[in-house]
Structure formats: C-alpha cells, structure tokens
Amino acid sequence: MRKIAQSLLASVLVVLVGCVTINVYFPEAAAKKAADQFIDTVLDSAPAAPAKPNPKPAAPGTPSRPSSGQPLAVLMNLLVPTAYAADTPDLRIQTAASEAIRERMRQRFQNELSGALSSGAVGLTQNGLVALRDASALSLTQRAVVNAAVAEENRDRDALYREVARANGHPEWEAQIRATFARGWIERAPAGWYYQNPAGGWQQK
C-alpha cells in the first residue's frame, strides 16, 4: 500500500510540474511599462534612478502551509504559488549591462541624435532602431558625425533587447521585447519626428 501511495504521489507531482511550466508567457503589460520608463529616461536626458529590489508580492489566495503530516498538501502548497507567479510574471530590465547602455544612449541622444531626429534627418524604424532618413538635412561634416551616432545607437539597441531577454531567462523573448520597444519609441517620440509605419514608409508625428 505504501508503494502505491508513493507512486501516486510521484504521478501527481509530474502533473503539477507540467501545469506550472506551460503557464510561462511573455509579460506584455510589464514589458511595455518597463520599456516606457527606459525610453523616458533616455529622451528626457535625465539621470536614471538606481535599481531597486523588486520582490514579487505573494499571490492573492495563496493557501497557508499545512502541517508536515500532509505530504500531498505540502507539495500543493509549494507548487501552486509557482503557478500563480507564472500567470503574473514580472520583467527585469535593470542590469549592469542595460544601465551602461542606457547611459550611453542618453549621452548620445543629448549630444548627437536629438537635433538630427528633430530636423527629420534621422527617423525611428519599425524594428526598434534608428536610420538616416534625409542626408540633405545635414552638412557634410554633420553627416559623418550622425552616421557614426546612428551606427553606435543601433548596436546599443540590439544589445539592449538581447540583454533584457537574457536577464529574464528567456532569450526567445528578444523579438517580442524588440517589438515592444519599437512601439514605445514611436509612441513617446515628440511631435515632428519621423517614424516608419508597418509598411516601412516614413511618416511624421
């Protein structure tokens, strides 16, 4: 009888773990909020606030821990909160690497890209990058500076999207994080800036 009970307990454990793992999904709302905050600190050219611990609160309705005499209930108590956490994931965006990228982007925007974006020489692309849109709006000297800034900015943006996905333990989220940031850059751009629509054409806000 004891062996049968142990076998049944093992089977229940496998089923519960399976239920937990399949609930992990891309936290779109959390990603948008984090992306918007990151973008605002870059475009406002204000120093970024230091990273703070962000503990996840206990999920509402989490059952209290039962006594040690109820092994199945103990397993349920350990696994159910994990399932709740998978249903309401957070998104970590502040790492040493991402903060270094943020600072470089802030400085670059303030020194080289702000004027180029405002004049329409540079625009925001549909895939979360920047591109030289109208070279005629720049002098020959300015073109060299802006071209270098655009290349550096795009390297940092690519690295940022990759780093956020890696920091959250889901490298496969990189494309979704990129898409979230791409929408955020456009939504939070000032009036007059140019951006690419979904078809790739340039539009002015």
Image (spheres, rainbow, N blue to C red):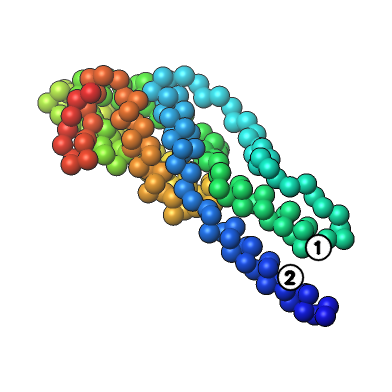
Mark 1 falls on what kind of element?
Answer: helix
Question: Residue 113, how many percent across, how many down?
Answer: 30, 25
Do we see residue 102 in this rendering?
A: no
Task: For the residues labelled 2 and 1, say whether their Cβ atoms are less than 8 Å apart.
Answer: yes
Q: Residue at x 22, y 20 (%)?
A: 192
Whether residue 81 sits left or right of residue 87 in the image: it is: right
- Residue assigned mark 1: 71
Residue 169 numbered tag: none
| Residue 132: percent from left, percent from top | 21, 33
**Splitting the image into 4 quarters, where does residue 107 fall?**
top left
Say what amino acid the circle numbered 2 marks: Leu
Query: Is tag 2's residue or tag 1's residue first in the polypeptide sequence?
Result: 2
Numbered tag placed on residue 9 in the rendering:
2
Can see residue 28?
A: yes
Disc 1: CA contacts within 10 A as few (<14), some (14-19) or many (>=20): few
Give the left or right position of residue 124, taking residue 40 as reference.
Answer: left
188 shown above or below 89: above
